[in-house]
């Protein structure tokens, strides 16, 4: 399974925006964007002026990095979004948000999408009673996501359970952190997706 393995703080600095790739650290003074709000590298502090293509490319790269996806898979998501009815950009973000690793993160079972992806990949979750270890699995309205019985005593889930009953960070999901399970109520609307991405620029890039 291909994935980015280098320092993720460099990615946030490259986009000059917090992408919240390291969970709790991103909310502290240790965040690299707060300490060094310029791109990494020798020419990071020089003034940069992007062309129209450059702006479109940066939005695509930002979306890929937020959801932890590489180019080939991202392009497949775009083709599927373009095939569906509705606004292509919004369809793309809905597809990315419905990934199992993102849903686990949104429900509060992971401090970051990377941690949620690892937990899913290690087989700690089940969807509708069946074990699923594919982070890119696309959830649907009505799906019930729960921590497997054998995994509930792991330290990461013990901490969640001890915190008591909680709520999902978004309205289109239900989450019961005490019982370590949640449900997909519906697909998210664009205004409910809080990622700092201008999806229309991605559509323009792939439409070239």
Image (tube, rainbow, N blue to C red):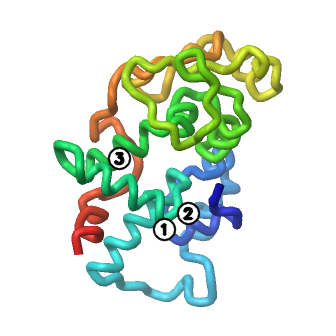
Earlier in the chain: of badge 1 and badge 3, it is 1
At which x and y percent is residue 35? 64, 65
Marks 1 and 2, how far apart at CA: 5 Å
Would residue 158 be seen by someone viewing this image from the given angle?
Answer: no
Residue 12: which numbered mark, if any?
Answer: 2
Q: Which residue is mark 3?
A: 93
Query: Helix or strand or loop: what does disc 3 sit on?
Result: helix
Marks 2 and 3, how far apart at CA: 19 Å
- Quadrant where the C terminus is found in the figure: bottom left
Q: Are marks 1 and 3 in contact (CB under 8 Å)?
A: no
- Quadrant where the N terminus is found in the figure: bottom right
Residue 15: which numbered mark, if any?
Answer: 1
At which x and y percent is residue 52? 26, 79
Q: Quadrant of residue 2?
A: bottom right
Q: Is residue 21 above or below residue 72?
A: above
Query: Helix or strand or loop: what does disc 2 sit on?
Result: helix
Q: Residue at x 64, y 62 (%)?
A: 4
Q: Quadrant of residue 185?
A: top left
Q: Are marks 1 and 2 in contact (CB under 8 Å)?
A: yes
**From the viewer's perspective, is the residue at label 1 or at label 3 nearer?**
3
**From the viewer's perspective, is the residue at label 2 or at label 3 nearer?**
3
In this rendering, would 162 be left or right of 113? right
Residue 88: which numbered mark, if any?
Answer: none
């Amino acid at each position: 399974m291909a994935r980015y393995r280098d320092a993720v703080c460099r990615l946030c600095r490259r986009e000059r925006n917090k992408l919240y790739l390291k969970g709790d650290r991103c909310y502290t003074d240790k965040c690299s964007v707060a300490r060094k709000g310029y791109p990494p590298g020798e020419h990071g502090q020089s003034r940069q002026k992007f062309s129209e293509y450059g702006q479109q490319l940066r939005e695509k790269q930002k979306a890929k990095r937020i959801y932890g996806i590489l180019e080939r898979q991202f392009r497949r998501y775009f083709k599927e979004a373009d095939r569906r009815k509705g606004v292509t950009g919004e369809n793309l973000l809905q597809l990315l948000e419905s990934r199992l690793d993102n849903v686990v993160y949104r429900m509060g079972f992971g401090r970051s999408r990377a941690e949620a992806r690892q937990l899913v990949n290690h087989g700690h979750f089940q969807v509708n009673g069946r074990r699923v270890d594919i982070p890119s699995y696309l959830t649907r309205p009505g799906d019930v996501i729960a921590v497997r019985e054998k995994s509930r005593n792991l330290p990461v889930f013990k901490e969640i359970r001890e915190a008591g009953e909680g709520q999902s960070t978004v309205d289109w999901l239900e989450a019961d952190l005490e019982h370590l399970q949640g449900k997909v109520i519906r697909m998210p609307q664009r205004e409910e997706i809080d990622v700092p991405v201008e999806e229309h620029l991605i559509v323009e890039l792939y439409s070239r």
